[in-house]
Image: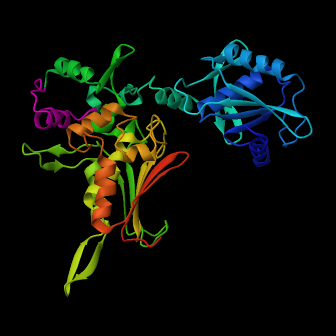
Amino acid sequence: MNRAELLELIRNGENSGVEFKRDDIRPEQLAKEMAALLNFEGGHILLGVDDDGRIPGLARSREEVERWVMNIAQENLQPNVIPVWSSVVLDNSVMVGVIRLQADSPDKPYKAKRGSAWVTFVRVGSTSREARREEEGRLYQAAHLMRYDIRPVLDTGFESLDLDRIANYFRVVLKRGTPGREDYESWRRTLVNIDILAEAAGTTAATVAGLLLFGENPNRRLPQAGITAAAFPREEKDYETIDEELIRGPLVSMLSSRKRVVEKGVIDRAVDFVVRNMGTVAWLEGGRRRRKRALPVDAVRESIVNAVAHRDYTLIGTDIEVSLYRDRLEVISPGRLPNGVTVEKMTEGLRAARNELLKEVLRDYGYVDHLGMGVRNRIIGAMRKHNGTEPDLIEEESRFTVRLWKKPMSR
């Protein structure tokens, strides 16, 4: 880092990736800031800079401070790290120490020593604080140390699942035989083996994925399950709606022996909501008036399936949102993209999933592209073919949005 870059960081102030500290703070304080940044997206700690941006500089020699920083990184962080250390001398001979912590570290969650305990810290804006239980869970999930979708859900069991729908999955989708309806023990073993049920604390409970896919009433124990759908008459969200629906229940549909839908699940009901409210577009072709749906159904379905398959189900109290406006459709999925996925990687066909079991079962039903090219072909390709528009794929702090435009836009 050169002087100009350092002064620019200081001028912009503390934020989610930059922390100012003196070099006389307690080791526990520095370890806390390092852990919080590592658990976010990495960043810089500037030693010798006050909170208000004044620059008193290092109070000790560069070598002494470097040894101090490296010792804290080894002794006060778990797992220990080797940060990138540098120093910058400003025009008035004041020296600032720079600790750079790598982004997207694979070893989350990082814990800092506090007394005799090890504590997980997270970065929230320009401050660092102790992680809440659900935040720590998401860090374990991001590091592939915990799969949330196969966790048991307390106070549920075999009776919480729709056996008819599960039997339909085995017989029609997988083309496999099933135990007799009254053979409870055979069903229990089968469903434990495929993670629809899980054994925990001496009992058998439905897993998160089991409830989402085949639950009798998933929202009873998973209030974050489901979709809130609304159609608005104009281009902004308002209290006035054309249609709205809280879509609840199991994700997948019941199928006939010919794989025709006989009882719709959440995914197909959400697609139906969009289809009945999206409207049409008309144009003249050779003197004749032509008309078609405002959006391609393949792109609509893929957007909804992706939201259902990849949303962060540890975020409680927030639904997937499907919102239709006069000029567009927005599908908003709670949580950031999973496991190092970026928009660019997604459009190239990267097959990384937050909820592996959900994804695999949805693939069995044909909802998920087995090559991982759903976004590229079914969303981007379908929109280009339909009306020549480019969909917007937007990652924000706590949600991911797919935006499909009804008409070509002049940009």
Q: Nearer the viewer, residue 73 or 83?
A: 83
Please name the residue shown 46% across and 41% down the image.
Answer: 337
**In the rendered image, the vertical position of residue 103 relative to residue 125, given as above or below:** above
Seen from this angle, which residue lies furthest bottom?
287
The reply to whether the magenta stretch includes residue 166 is: yes
**In the rendered image, the vertical position of residue 15 relative to residue 31, given as above or below:** below
What range is drawn magenta here? Answer: 161-181
Q: Tell me the quarter of the image containing the N terminus.
A: top right
Q: Quadrant of residue 403?
A: bottom left
Q: Nearer the viewer, residue 43 or 187?
A: 43
Q: Nearer the viewer, residue 214 or 1?
A: 1
The reply to whether the magenta stretch includes residue 8 is: no
Q: Quadrant of residue 85?
A: top right
> Can the viewer see residue 41 in this picture?
yes
Q: Is residue 130 left or right of residue 52?
A: left
**In the rendered image, the vertical position of residue 254 relative to residue 197, given as above or below:** below
- The image position of residue 174, as x and y in percent, is 14, 33
Q: Nearer the viewer, residue 282 or 156?
A: 282
- The image position of residue 333, as x and y in percent, is 43, 48
- The image position of residue 298, as x and y in percent, is 26, 56
Seen from this angle, which residue lies furthest left?
257
- The image position of residue 78, as x and y in percent, is 62, 17
